[in-house]
Amino acid sequence: MPTSPDPVRRRRRGPELEAALLDAAWRELLDVGYARLTMESVAARAETGVAVLYRRWANKEELTLAALEHHRAATRAEIPQPGTLRDDLLAALQSMSERNSGFWVVVTGAAFSGLLAESGLTPAQVRERILGDGARARVDALYRRAHDRGELDLARVPPAVLALPFDLVRHDLLMDLEPLEPARIRSIVDEIFLPLVRQYGGSAEVVGGT
């Protein structure tokens, strides 16, 4: 009895192919880490030739950074709908903590395994490249809504204060490599951020405490 021919593999092109390559690179980072990742191992996982990778990325550090950007964009934390500044921040930081703990495990492992040395980038430059303008725009929108509700004055609150809750959560994720406890997130918002906002004329109130 004749055997059925193998199904013809649909050829991937353009954005679909690039997404498949970046997904393969991300899975390699998860499974073997940056130090053992190679262009050849990613190509094998993606079931394509290594030349396909080199046409897009010059080396494994560029591929790794692109894979981190791609995964970050695909799993970005949700910014909640308008509520109060406190409720919006709690929800945003909780989502950030739950979605990104595994991501920062990979980033930290890559950094300590040679990504910084081989790419020639500083930690701040890697962070800026991975986070990009999209994350900043979503956070700006959260604060703009609070400004429009009269809970803070964007003309008076320094940018460093506005960045503080997200920087503290990111710091804890990098240090502990696991999601933050809800009590820690409430402490960041209620005991650190909102008291600072009130010093600059904001009306946002702590509700319920920690």
Image: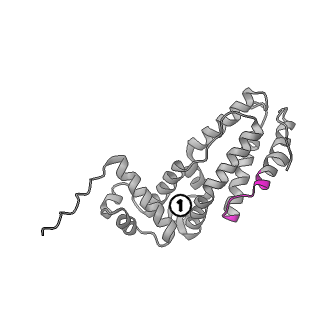
Residue at coordinates 78% horizontally, 55% vertically from top-left? 184
- Label 1: state its secondary structure: loop
Q: Amino acid at mark 1?
A: Gly
Residue 177 covered by magenta stretch: yes
Camera-nearest residue between 148 and 34: 148
Residue 117, given in percent of the width and then of the height, sits at 54, 66
Q: Residue furthest left?
A: 1
Residue at coordinates 73% horizontally, 41% vertically from top-left? 162
Q: Which quarter shows the N terminus? A: bottom left
Within 10 angstroms of label 1, few (less than 14), some, or many (20 or more) residues?
A: few
Q: Is residue 61 visible in this depiction of the protein?
A: no
Q: Quadrant of residue 58?
A: bottom left
Residue 141, given in percent of the width and then of the height, sits at 65, 34
Residue at coordinates 75% horizontally, 30% vertically from top-left? 155
Q: How is the image coloured?
A: one colour
Which span of residues is magenta-colored?
176-185
Camera-nearest residue between 183 and 166: 183
User: Which residue, given by chain and number where applicable, does mark 1 sit on?
Assistant: 120
Q: Is residue 202 above or below residue 105?
A: above
Q: Is residue 71 visible in this depiction of the protein?
A: yes
